[in-house]
Amino acid sequence: MTASMWLITLFLVSSFGGILCVFWWAKRDGQFENVEDIKYRMLHDD
């Protein structure tokens, strides 16, 4: 493989790893726990 193919492969693998890390962080932080409740929050008058 040429040097450009190695760079593209390294870029794709690191991008995929970064996306997985961000998804794991959001899942651990509870971002996907209750996605239906947010759209009804504006209807509740506090």
Image (cartoon, rainbow, N blue to C red):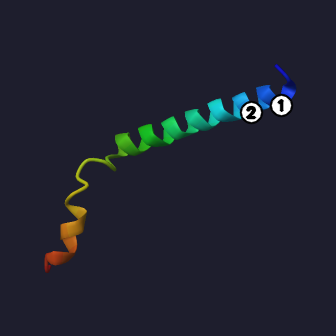
Q: Is residue 7 left or right of residue 15?
A: right
Image position of 33 with respect to 16: above or below? below
Horizontally, residue 34 falls left or right of residue 9, namely left
Identify the secondary structure beneath mark 1.
helix
The structure residue drawn at horizontal position 44% and vertical position 41%, both measured from the top left corner, is 23
Is the N terminus in the top left, top right, bottom left or bottom right quadrant?
Answer: top right
- In this figure, which residue is indicated by the disc labeled 1? 4
| Residue closer to the observer: 29 or 6 | 6
Disc 1 vs disc 2: Cβ atoms closer than 8 Å? yes
Q: Amino acid at mark 2?
A: Ile
Where is residue 25? Give x, y as percent: 44, 41
Could you tell me residue 38's position as x and y percent? Answer: 24, 64
Q: Is residue 8 above or below residue 26?
A: above
The residue wearing badge 2 is 8
**Spatial CA span between label 1 and label 2:** 6 Å
The answer to which image quadrant residue 16 occupies is top right
At x 30%, y 48%, the residue is 32
Q: Amino acid at mark 1?
A: Ser
User: Can you name the residue that lies furthest to the right here?
Assistant: 3
- Which dot marks residue 28? none
Residue shown at 83% from the left, 31% from the top: 4
Please indicate whether residue 7 sits to the left or right of residue 32 in the image: right
- Disc 1 crowd, CA 10 A, few/some/many (<14, 14-19, 20+): few
Quadrant of image for the C terminus: bottom left
Q: Nearest the camera: 24 or 8?
A: 8
Image-quadrant location for residue 5: top right
Looking at the image, is 1 positioned above or below residue 9? above
Q: Is residue 37 above or below residue 15?
A: below
Q: Secondary structure at mark 2?
A: helix
Residue located 21% across and 75% down the image: 42
